[in-house]
Amino acid sequence: MDVGLNFRKLTGPIEHWLTTFHQGYWGFRPDKKEAWEEIEVGEVFVFHASSTEFLETPRGALTDVSTGIIGLGRVGAKSTKNEPAWWEELHLDGNYPYLIHFSEIYWFGDTDQIRDAPVSEKDVSEMVDDIHAIAENIITFGEMRERAGYQIPAQGSPGNIKSPEKLFPLLQERLDGSLEQSTPEDDDESASGNEIRERNRERDIDEEGAENREVTYEQSVKETISGTIEHEEILDTFEDYLSDRGFDGGETERSDLIMSSDDDVVLGEAKSIHPGNERGQIRRALGQVLEYRKRDIYDDGELSSLSATLCLILSQPPSEEYLSILESVESDGIFTYWIDNGRIDGPDKSMARLREITT
């Protein structure tokens, strides 16, 4: 994410940010409707996590968790909702009907440790563990004062940041780190994620489907979900191509796509790209395919004996700058493809590799 120097902040208790992690949106109370209306698509917000307010935890369970900035995101759309999503809504009398959806989010914490399930399915103990995970690498107020000579206001949401240029080095440092994180290789839970399962290809993105979920979307909400849908559709195209040529498989907890034939295994990471996110998306994809090759291929007894092809599957051709970078890693077994009107395309060497393993 190219945050530039124009960003604001959102403030809320840290348990509320777990809902944002799972759902991709932030909510406002009815008395904050005017502030919600003024938020514009494209604005970047830092996520300020304050102390827990609505989670009754055992004494001392969260005393080691600091307050501060735990991530940031770019607004993609706005909508309203009726169903409860935050812990406060689920267990108390909270009400946050006005939503902003993020088209891009970057968390600074160890979010790989957070189970992918809504807050409604979690108990207090799991929420405490999740809070510790999402609060790792937090930019504390002490660090802001010491390293930046400036700190964000502790109150007010949404709020303006008067001297964002002073915080930018800290944010960029965390952003760079968030794109390079990996989990320990000997993690027992990670090892169990090798199981290949069929990809879920049922999705409903029309307005009627949205209404059935009791969410009233503005026209721009499709811009928010379009990145996710685009991500899935380019995977559909690539999966169909391989399946028609004798490959079988699906996905794992980590890998977007992993399919094998008698002699070859293909591991694919799909990214929806545009000029504003190309750098981060490509950097992330390169790191992911290398990590997932180790976890989902080399650590698998059956797949480790096959010839591995690592694929970046993009929603559109990369810029000339990044195309040259991607072509330079083809010799390392990492190939790049993009989907053009339902057809797979890519650099010459990448296309030659695809033909080699499918004919």
Image: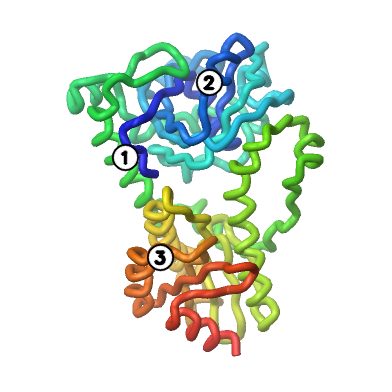
Q: Amino acid at mark 2?
A: Glu
Q: What SS does tag 2 mark?
A: helix
On the image, the x and y values in percent for residue 276 come to 42, 48
On the image, the x and y values in percent for residue 347 come to 44, 77
Question: Which residue sits furthest top?
Answer: 31
Q: CA distance from mark 3 to mark 1?
A: 21 Å
Camera-side mark, 3 or 1: 1
Q: What SS does tag 3 mark?
A: helix
Q: Earlier in the sequence, mark 1 or mark 2?
A: 2
Camera-side mark, 3 or 2: 2
Q: Earlier in the sequence, mark 3 or mark 2?
A: 2
Q: Amino acid at mark 3?
A: Leu
Identity of the residue drawn at 58% across and 68% down:
340
Q: Quadrant of residue 33?
A: top right
Query: How is the protein colored in the picture?
Result: rainbow
Identity of the residue drawn at 40% across and 25% down:
8
Q: Which residue is mark 1?
A: 174
On the image, the x and y values in percent for residue 333 come to 40, 77
Q: Amino acid at mark 1?
A: Arg
Seen from the viewer's position, the closer of residues 266 and 244 is 244
Q: Which residue is mark 2?
A: 38
Placement of 326 over or under 114, stated as above or below = below
On the image, the x and y values in percent for residue 12 come to 48, 19
Placement of 342 over or under 47, stated as above or below = below
For the C terminus, the image quarter is bottom right
